[in-house]
Amino acid sequence: MPFISQSLIDDIERRKEAIRRVWDYKRVDHIPIAMRVAANPWGYTTREHFLDAEKQFQIESESVKLSLEMIPDDYIPSMRVDVGCVVIESALGAEIVFGDDPNQTCNVKEPILRSVDDIYKLKMPNPHTDGLVPEGLRRIKMFTERTDGQVYVSCLDMGGAMNVAFTLLGGLQFYMMSYDHPEALDHLSSFTTDCFILFAEECIKAAGGIEHVTSTDFPYIWQPEGRKGHCSDDICAQFSPEFFNRFSKPHNNRIFARFGGGMLHNCGPNPCASEYLSHDPPIKAVDLAYEYSKNDLPAFKQAFAGKGVIYFGMPADPAEYRRVMEVLAPDVIAIPEVAVSPDQDVKGIYEAFLEVSKEYASRMNWR
């Protein structure tokens, strides 16, 4: 029995077309709402589902089922395959540890690069034997097969060149090296970008092709064809635009050149907002944490006008989305990324967001 009915598959194609159009600033009747029902009736902790693929699949498949049933429109079914956000670091030999809070993600025990020499001694890891990667690949294949390829799967949470370098070196050494040994930091970042591209290619193979993945990184968000490139640069919240252009952008560019100029993640704040879209190839979107980025709306209005889309991970409060619209319309499109629980009034919340998104679309300067 198919995981999703044919009639629903046809409607999902219509929803995808709305995303394609919005990314190109072409007229739609409403801005799509990236809402999903987050369900975990078994009460599994973050640590439990990180360590147990069956529990993670239970959570993800239940969320897909309820989202398709309860959200009236816009939802594109997807599952996040998550083994932690230090995937490249683990493959390079960093020890992975969990803290006391069972609902906290894992991290590295300590930085493993103590000197410039350590950087030049790094060897390319094997994605089928090293660190968290093999388990991640196994889950991608499993999730895809169990849903008959009808549900998009994420790739792994691999960060990006600067995030990984910061973790491997530690904060103080990272910044000192950018001044004292910038060539070594470039070498490290180029090397970890090689790892990212290799691992992303293996993720795509495990999913049966790039058409089955949301993007080359962790988000649930479905990215249009030819624009599947995604990486994270959370650490750029501490950068000047000049530092971002010098150290982040060249390595991000390689990911976007390989997989398409798609989307960049930074929780926020965003001192480099003016530089986000001007990658080579140019990217089309960013995904941000609303709480840490909401004060940057004027900067995005100036930098993204008519060419960039913002996904805001935000609370299920349409009043906050209205605030975004009032600042950004008619120049910049923002898509609310909202998680709701099955015991909330899911339809009512969606319809309240829809009211704003229809008004938002009516105000936009479309191409």
Image (tube, rainbow, N blue to C red):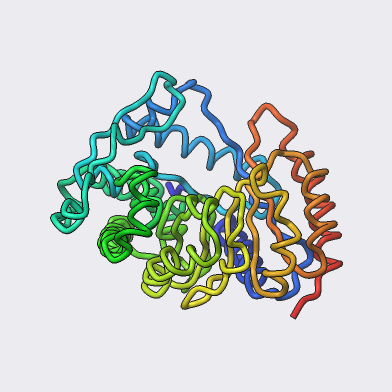
* Residue 144 seen in the current view: no
Looking at the image, which residue is at 49% across and 63% down? 244
**Residue 34 horizontal/vertical position (percent):** 64, 51
* Residue 299 sits above or below residue 257 on the image: above
Answer with left or right where residue 183 lies relative to residue 271.
left
Residue at 63% of width from left, 70% of height from top?
A: 23
Q: Quadrant of the C terminus?
A: bottom right
Point out residue 163 in the picture as x, y percentages from the top left corner: 40, 51
Lateral position of residue 30 relative to residue 166, left or right: right
Q: Residue furthest bottom?
A: 367
Residue placed most toward the observer, 222 or 69? 222
Q: Quadrant of residue 122?
A: bottom left
Residue at screen point 58% across, 64% down:
285
The image shows residue 161 at horizontal and vertical percentages of 36, 58
* Viewer-nearest residue: 258 or 6: 258
Residue shown at 56% from the left, 66% from the top: 276
Instruction: Say how many tags the image has.
Output: 0
Residue 243 visible, this angle: yes
Residue 273 horizontal/vertical position (percent):
61, 62
